[in-house]
Image (spheres, rainbow, N blue to C red):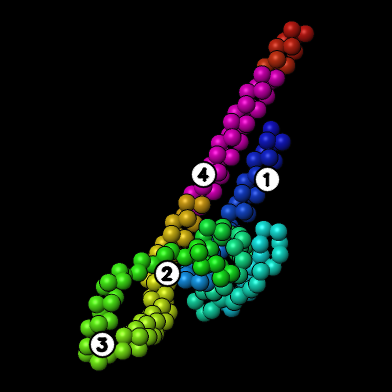
Amino acid sequence: MTNFKTLFFGALMMLVGGFVVPAEAHKVIASAYAEGSVIEGEIGFSNGDMATDALVEVFDDDGNKLGEARTDEDGVFQFTPTKAVPHIFKANLGAGHVAEFRMDVGDLPDGIGGDASAAAPVQAPAAAEVAAVEDELQAEGVDPAALKELIEAAVNDQIAQMKPIVAQAVRKETKPLRKTVAAYMEKNDMQAILGGIGYIIGLCGVGFYVAARMERKKAMAGAAKREGVA
């Protein structure tokens, strides 16, 4: 019985000790996706805090360093890939927290290394339609080539101005969702720990029951033997 009691309380203390420490810890949450010609990533913790000014190192599958980046105040970093190989991102956040995740070649931006063939083709308007528009512009005294350059420059300028605004708005709107998902994951993990504790305690209870029966049988056998001798 003493051995079972020692085993039971030892296992219980180990589980309780392992339960208390992680309860105050937070998981590292990291992700990345292709954004135009760059990789944009985000690193933070399950409680909603972001990893600011964190060094992010990038490696290939063979351990060769491809480059590095740093997260901003929102935990966001950008990295421009130059090779069409899997990218492994690593960031040591301190206190035992390490972020590491991998992007396959298929998830990288298109046209890496100047390979424009990977980009999706854009369907050009019919030559007859272009000629008709140019004729109308020339009839109005407008140079079609100059107008085209002005339009392209204005569109590119608007896209460049709107891109960071949209990205910031998306990060801001999805932050509560990340917290909700992280809280749900932590809750499930805690339930799994409690379930594991209950399972261990149940096994120990079965052990106590079996040991008690064995002790009882031994006691009855000893009593019977003593009675036979008497």
Give the residues drawn in magenta, as a range: 190-219
User: Quick one: label 1 or label 4, which is nearer the N terminus?
Assistant: 1
Residue 203 seen in this snapshot: yes
- Label 1 – label 4 distance at C-alpha: 18 Å
Residue 50 shows in the view: no
Image quadrant holding the C terminus, namely top right
x then y, percent, for residue 186: 49, 57
Asked if the residues shown at circle 4 and circle 2 are in contact, with their CB atoms under 8 angstroms apart, the answer is: no
Question: Is label 3 or label 4 in front?
Answer: 3
Residue corresponding to mark 4: 195
Q: Secondary structure at mark 2?
A: helix
Residue type indicated by callout 3: Gln
Q: Which residue is mark 3?
A: 138
Q: In what element is the residue under mark 3?
A: helix
Within 10 Å of disc 1 (Cα), the crowding (few <14, some 14-19, many 20+) is few
Q: Residues within 10 Å of mark 2 (few under 14, many from 20)?
A: some
Q: Secondary structure at mark 1?
A: helix
Is residue 210 depicted above or below 143 in this figure? above
Residue at mark 1: 10
Point out the residue furthest to the bottom here: 141
Front in this rendered view, residue 32 or 208:
32
Q: In percent of the image, x 26 and y 73: which residue is there?
A: 129
Determine the image quadrant of residue 211. Answer: top right
Q: Using the numbered discs, state the Cα–Cα distance from disc 3 to disc 1 in whole angstroms.
A: 91 Å
Q: Mark number for residue 175? A: 2
